[in-house]
Amino acid sequence: MSNLPQKRAIIVGATSGIGKELAIVLTQNNFLVGITGRRKALLDELQQLYNCEVSCFDIKDTATAIMQLTILTQQLGGLDLLIISSGYGDNNPDLDNSIEQSTIDTNVTGFTAVVGWAYTYFKQQGRGHIVNISSIGGLRGGAAAPSYGASKAYQINYLEGLQQKSNRQKANIRFTDVRPGFVDTAMAKSDKKFWVSSPQKAAADIWNAITKQRQVVYVTKRWEFIALLLKLLPRKWYVKL
């Protein structure tokens, strides 16, 4: 039997989809897991099935989010891994500002507060691993949901900036930027979906990336080809698609 101490993880946004499946994977791999989300009934269901610690909050309320993450970390007895799976996006053909603002509040403001809290905690601790579920949609703008792609581009660049900061400060913090294509969750709202992954397959790929300490991973791997095409396509052609 291994004498290594049990590792502890928090998943922000674990009530459904990728976050929920990651909670299952981590508990199956001997992690103590804390889960958060807005829907308490779903959190409680996971707690009963997999013995997770639970904290119910909305990351748009940044002050509450930071306070609850601190409490949850104390309940776990520490923290080794933070996964941010919480996100929002919706098709917005009429540019309804309430949709755009809700996307920004969740994917930019809430994300920044949570990842900043984790960076500070891990820097003081001297080690840690931050994983964020961004999107291949963050590589270019998107007409169907402009704020979603823009917010995911923000996450991609923010995480890269923190990785550079960690290297300069010798903070010993690892980062994994997960960029899914289409995953069969409520977030996948395009009418032209292809190469759709199940949440279970996505979680397995993400767990593999975590164990290998990958800096960037596309889920599933075939989306790396699409990412290359998106990066190479000139703007004057892309905006006509």
Image (cartoon, rainbow, N blue to C red):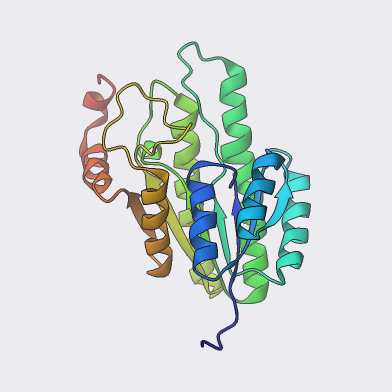
Task: From the top left corner, tell me how far across and down residue 56 is, in percent.
Answer: 73, 45
Q: In this rendering, is residue 94 above or below 232? A: above
Q: Where is residue 126? Give x, y as percent.
A: 61, 77
From this view, report whether residue 241 is shown above or below residue 224: above
Looking at the rendering, which quadrant does residue 226 occupy?
Answer: top left
Q: Is residue 142 visible?
A: yes
Towards the viewer: 231 or 53: 53
Q: Is residue 192 above or below residue 55?
A: above
* Left or right of 11 in this view: 220: left
**Residue at the top extreme?**
94
Write down the quadrant of residue 80 in the picture: bottom right
| Residue 163 on image: x %, y % | 48, 62
Question: Which residue sits at x=48%, y=59%?
Answer: 25
Quadrant for the C terminus, please: top left
Tally the numbered discs: 0
Residue at point 40% right, 36% down?
Answer: 184
- Tell me if 118 is positioned left or right of 85 in this view: right
Q: Nearer the viewer, residue 147 or 202?
A: 202
Residue 58 can be seen in this image: no
Extreme residue toward the front, this view: 49
Name the residue rendered at 33%, 50% in the picture.
218
| Residue 164 in the image, given as x and y percentages of width and height | 47, 63
Residue situated in front as seen by the camera: 180 or 109: 180
